[in-house]
Amino acid sequence: MCEARYPLKTKKRVDYELFKRALELVNRKEHLTEEGLAKIVSIKASMNRGLSEELKVAFPNTLTVPIPVVENQEIKDPY
């Protein structure tokens, strides 16, 4: 309901879409394998603040995933 009235825009929308991808992996229990965990870390690397120093050390060969494109980034004037 709120999404239609107050849709996410720009970087927040991108981070939300990436978070959804990671959550889907967890729901399918893919995070329990090394490959699935690496996918989640790659998604995290593409998000807002990227990887923490601890994660960079633990996963040194992590590549970022392609960032989703957000169409219509115009913020409408509520007045």
Image: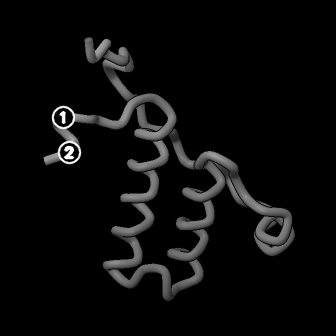
Q: Is residue 32 above or below residue 27?
A: below
> In the image, is residue 39 above or below residue 63?
below
- For badge 1, the amino acid type reads Arg
Give the SS element for disc 2.
Answer: helix
Q: CA distance from mark 1 to mark 2?
A: 5 Å
Residue placed at 62% from the left, 65% from the top?
41
Residue at x-position 39% and y-position 71%: 25
Amino acid type at circle 2 is Cys
Residue that badge 1 annotates: 5
- Helix, strand or loop at label 1? It is helix
Residue wearing tag 2: 2
Estimate the x, y position of residue 28 in percent, counting from the top left: 32, 79
Residue 20 or residue 79, whichever sits in front:
79
Quarter assignment of residue 40? bottom right
How many numbered marks appear? Answer: 2
Is residue 31 left or right of 3 when viewed as pictured?
A: right
Asked which quadrant contains residue 10, the reply is top left
Say which of 52 and 9 sits in front: 9
Residue 65's place in the image compared with 31, above or below, is: above
What residue sits 52% from the left and 85% below the top? 33
Q: Is 6 placed left or right of 36 in the picture?
A: left
- Percent x, y of residue 78: 27, 17
Q: Residue furthest bottom?
A: 32
Image position of 60 (left or right of 20) = right
